[in-house]
Image (tube, grey):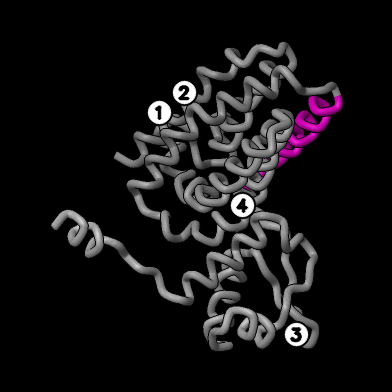
Amino acid sequence: MMGQELSESIQRIGVGDQVFAILKAKIASGEWENGDRIPSENELASQFGVSRMTIHNALQRLSTMGLLETKPGDGTYVRRFHLAEYFMEAAELIDNPKNMQDIREFRGSFEKNYLKLACERRSEEDLKDLKRIYARMKELSETEEFDAFFDADMDFHHRICQMADNEVYLMVESVLRGLLYAQLKDNTERFARVKNASMNIEDENYVLKVLVKEHMDFIDALTKRDPSLAADKLNDYFEKYSELED
């Protein structure tokens, strides 16, 4: 009886799934390396003893994952896999209020962690480059060019993440900012109200002027290699953003 129950619980995968798994394993193991031209659909169908359509579907799945690319009239090649690109393709699937709140909660600790590494590992050249980006932000804070300001703002934080000298942090940072960029712009007016800032460019507390001043804390932290100088600012930032969602 026990053997019968176990037998009935086993899920047998289809031929197509098996072929897909084998081909993916060839790439993962390095048997098929980046830049290699793989056998044609007809050749693979003959090797596996399956239909060409089965092979075609498996290759399409691998292409969708970014593991293969087809060059018309030439063939199909293994391409270098970029996890960030894979996540960005799936970004729209997690673009909902609950997931966005989860991401903001994660970013609070995530950004403090890579700031800490950046303070330890930054060079003088890194600081000069960050100050150049800050100067651009300050220039834009005197205008109503919100899109350009947020582009520079993204560049500023991306540059800090680069200073951490960690590829995984950099990958995750790129994905998170890609997901939240449009929302950051859309929430500017609401953020201004929370920060008691003005949307009038003539006012001293004009929202872009307020935002750019707060970024000096990051430069101070990196200059003195003391992440605590900006940690409180990060905490405040994410608390304020949570208020926007209430």
Pointer 2 with pointer 4, Cβ within 8 A: no
**Dot 2 crowding, Cα within 10 Å, few <14, some 14–19, many 20+:** few
Q: Nearer the viewer, residue 34 or 104?
A: 34
Disc marking residue 72: 3
State the SS at label 3: loop
* Dominant secondary-structure state across the stretch colored magenta: helix
Pointer 3 with pointer 2, Cβ within 8 A: no
Tell me if 81 is positioned left or right of 244 in this view.
Answer: right
What is the spatial separation of the Cα atoms under label 2 and label 4, in whole angstroms? Answer: 29 Å
Q: Nearer the viewer, residue 128 or 77?
A: 77
**What span is in magenta?**
125-144
Tell me if 100 is positioned left or right of 163 in this view.
Answer: left
From the top left corner, tell me how far across and down residue 197 is, in percent: 48, 33
Task: Please tell me which residue is depicted at 62% across the width and 16% down the height of the picture.
Answer: 227
Circle nearer the viewer, 1 or 3: 3
Circle nearer the viewer, 2 or 4: 4
State the SS at label 4: helix
